[in-house]
């Protein structure tokens, strides 16, 4: 018997009764998906846009690299005919790994507040706030496909799992943003859901543009290409480390962190190793310490003792440059007229984050270490994080820009390129205009 469109519809109906993963008759043709990401000039957050709901509405979201879920404000203007809450004990709650259930405290259930619903704990990392009553839901989500080099059609997912939150959790987000899109190590984070739905490998790539005028890209699937350059062949790989405790604002949840950690063993400035308390570089039994990669911080943050030795070594190696007054949040600033320029930014000492061996390191050049704060002043773009930090080193957004990062969740590895300027390209060069 031939498999007709009528049979397909019945098959999808059966699947939808037991699972949230049915995406349309042409879904096997979808090989990869992309999000365009632009840096907000005011908040320095990285913003993308997706389509959600029925009818589809364009929703602006801030990227939260280590976030567990895609969460949106459902209290203010959420209208959709395809919205469905996840009831306690449902498949959706199991996928989300939550067993907290409850009823709506208002007089009548509404979107984001339903009886017998299950809840998780979404976080806003920009104001260090969490909400323990995030309701698990499903709705339509639309995201753009790609062939690896060119954008393609938008693909609809009829039953994407997300979290509803009240409006207060959007405080501190960029203007017009309605929530965050979590890319972390969790089953309902965007990468894992897309991998399950489209049968992709469980990996994704991040390439953030340093320009507020041009878009970078987040790519789900294999085969991303920048114009005429396949940077993926030159990636350096290091293991991703699991922090056994939730971090960010929710360390007390006593569950593995969804954030991304790597094993920095030492730091070199201009090729010279600086002296650091090695205990700070490991993760202790309470989940403190180690090195986290985060878009929740606009600049890298170093525990105070690490910050002191790194900045001192940097100043010593740049002794010919003219120091000037500090410009918050930075403490180490120079006259730009006293610093030369190179293809990879200002001619300053390199900073190496040394990983599993001395030959494996993430090298930070001037384009990612120096911030132009005025026409005549540049500052070392690292911030003193204090002495009581959850993570001893946080590699922030500025240090990630124009670097290609490949997160392989199945193998638990990170591939990184260092500055793409060496390849005479940037993250703004992905083609978002020519259709495949």
Image: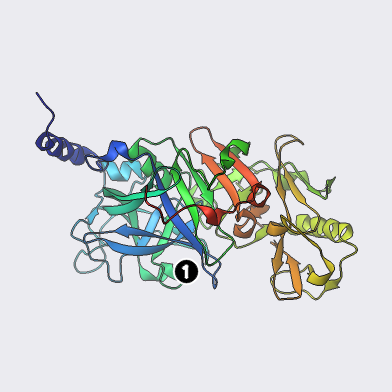
x 53%, y 54%: residue: 429
Left or right of residue 332: residue 29: left
Q: Please tell me whether residue 190 is drawn above or below residue 308 in the rendered image.
A: above
Q: On the rendered structure, is 294 left or right of 102? A: right
Residue 208 in view in this figure: no
Rendered residue at 23%/42% (across/down)? 24
Residue drawn 19% across the image and 67% down it: 108
Q: Position of residue 13 (x, y in %)?
A: 15, 40
Does 283 sit above or below residue 135?
A: above
Q: Is residue 168 above or below residue 32?
A: below
- Closer-to-camera residue (206/285): 206
In the image, taking residue 50 as reference, residue 297 lies left or right, namely right
Residue at 55%, 71% in the rendered image = 41
Residue matched to label 1: 173
The image position of residue 31, as x and y in percent, is 37, 39
Q: How many marks?
A: 1
- Which residue is nearer to you in this view: 334 or 301? 334
**Helix, strand or loop status at disc 1:** loop
Q: Seen from this angle, which residue lies furthest top?
A: 1
């Amino acid at each position: 018997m031939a498999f007709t469109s009528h049979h397909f519809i019945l098959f999808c109906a059966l699947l939808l009764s037991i699972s949230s993963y049915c995406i349309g008759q042409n879904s096997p043709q979808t090989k990869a998906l992309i999000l365009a990401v632009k840096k907000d000039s005011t908040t320095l957050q990285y913003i993308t846009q997706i389509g959600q709901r029925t009818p589809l509405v364009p929703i602006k979201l801030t990227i939260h690299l280590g976030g567990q879920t895609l969460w949106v404000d459902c209290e203010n203007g959420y209208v959709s005919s395809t919205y469905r809450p996840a009831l306690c004990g449902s498949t959706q709650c199991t996928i989300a790994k939550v067993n907290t259930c409850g009823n709506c405290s208002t007089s009548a259930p509404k979107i984001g507040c339903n009886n017998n619903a299950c809840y998780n704990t979404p976080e806003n990392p920009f104001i260090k706030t969490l909400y323990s009553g995030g309701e698990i839901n499903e709705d339509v989500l639309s995201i753009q496909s790609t062939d690896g080099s060119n954008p393609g059609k938008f693909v609809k997912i009829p039953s994407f799992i997300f979290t509803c939150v009240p409006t207060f959790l959007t405080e501190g987000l960029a203007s017009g943003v309605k929530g965050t899109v979590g890319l972390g190590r969790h089953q309902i984070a965007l990468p894992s859901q897309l991998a399950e739905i489209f049968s992709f490998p469980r990996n994704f790539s991040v390439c953030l543009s340093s320009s507020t005028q041009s878009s970078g890209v987040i790519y789900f699937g294999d085969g991303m290409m920048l114009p005429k350059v396949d940077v993926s062949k030159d990636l350096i790989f290091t293991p991703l480390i699991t922090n056994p405790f939730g971090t960010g604002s929710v360390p007390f949840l006593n569950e593995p962190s969804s954030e991304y950690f790597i094993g920095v063993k030492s730091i070199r400035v201009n090729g010279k190793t600086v002296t650091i308390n090695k205990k700070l570089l490991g993760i202790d039994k309470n989940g403190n310490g180690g090195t986290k990669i985060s878009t929740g911080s606009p600049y890298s943050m170093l525990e105070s003792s690490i910050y002191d030795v790194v900045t001192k070594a940097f100043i010593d190696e740049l002794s010919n440059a003219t120091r000037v007054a500090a410009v918050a949040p930075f403490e180490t600033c120079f006259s730009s007229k006293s610093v030369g320029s190179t293809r990879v930014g200002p001619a300053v000492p390199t900073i190496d984050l040394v990983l599993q061996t001395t030959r494996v390191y993430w090298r930070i050049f001037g384009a990612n270490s120096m911030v132009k704060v005025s026409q005549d002043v540049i500052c070392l773009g690292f911030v003193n994080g204090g002495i009581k930090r959850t993570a001893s080193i946080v590699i922030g957004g500025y240090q990630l820009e124009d670097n290609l990062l490949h997160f392989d969740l199945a193998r638990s590895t990170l591939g990184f390129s260092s500055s793409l300027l060496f390849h005479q390209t940037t993250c703004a060069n992905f083609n978002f205009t020519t259709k495949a």
